[in-house]
Every structure is written in C-alpha cells, then in structure tokens.
Image (cartoon, grey):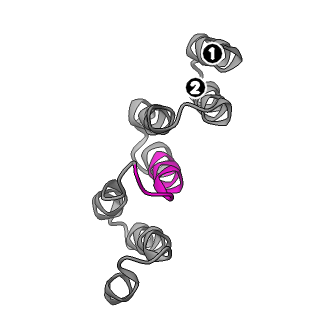
Amino acid sequence: MEAIGEFTGTSEEVKVLIANSELSLRKGEVKQALDMLKTVTADSPHYKAARIAMADIYLKHTGDRRLYAKCFSDIVESEKTVANYLLLGEAFMKIQEPEEAIRVYQKALE
C-alpha cells in the first residue's frame, strides 16, 4: 500500500494498484482485490486493464458470470470501439452465451 502513495498521480499508479490487487488475491482476499480495482474510474487510461482484471476475478474466484460480462460491458460503455465490442463478444462466448455474443458482434460490424 505504501507504493500506491508514492505513485499517486503518476501513470504507474494503476499498475501498482493492479499488482496490489493480485497480492490480495494470493492471500485469499477477493473482496479487497475487487474493491481496489473498482476505484479505477472510466477516465483513467488504465480503466480497461482494471476491468479486465476484475472480470478475471469474478469468473475465476467468485464464479459470477454476470459480473464477469458486466466488466466487459463497462469497457464498451466507456469507449465504443470495435476492439472493445469484440472483447465483450469473446466474454459472452467464454461464459457460453452465444446469442449475446452474436448480438455484440453485429454491433461491432455497425
């Protein structure tokens, strides 16, 4: 946590935050890891990385497929790019929601 203070306001701040969340996971502190990542706002250049890390936690550590997909949906909402729509589509495929994936892929084509 001391490192976060040292890097506050720099481009490395979110990288340190993500690393700290990984340390929390290793200690079995899933909620703490998620809470850290939730502090990254949509205007941060590292928002996408933080949301992807959160999605991974939701799927692997809590088994919550809905929140897993929501993380990718949040990414699309923050920046509607083809690449982000493709990420969301892949997320739906990963959780066995092909109908939703098709819908998202069609949006990406538009």
Where is the C terminus found, in terms of image quarters?
top right
Q: Percent x, y for residue 77?
A: 44, 32
> For this rendering, which residue is in front, 80 or 87?
80
Q: Is residue 22 left or right of residue 41?
A: right
Closer to the chain start, of discs 2 and 1, is: 2
Mark 1 belongs to which amino acid?
Pro
Could you tell me which residue is drawn at 46 percent across and 67 percent down? 18
Instruction: Judge whether residue 64 is colored magenta.
Output: no
Residue at 28% x, 58% y is 35
Q: Find residue 56 and report its horizontal and vertical position in percent.
A: 51, 49
Q: Residues within 10 Å of mark 1 (few under 14, many from 20)?
A: some
Q: Nearer the viewer, residue 54 or 95?
A: 54
Query: Rounded to the nearest whole Å, what is the CA distance between mark 2 and mark 1?
Result: 6 Å
Q: Is residue 48 one of those drawn in magenta?
A: yes
In the rendered view of the protein, which quadrant contains the N terminus?
bottom left
Q: Are marks 2 and 1 in contact (CB under 8 Å)?
A: yes
Q: What amino acid type should be assigned to the residue bearing mark 2?
A: Phe
Tell me the element at label 1. Answer: helix
| Residue 89 as seen in the image, left or right of residue 23 | right
Residue under the image location 37 percent in, 89 percent down:
6
Image quadrant in which you'd find residue 86: top right
- Residue drawn where x is 40% and y is 51% of the image: 43
Q: Which residue is mark 1?
A: 98
Residue that mark 2 sits on: 92
Q: Which residues are magenta?
A: 43-56
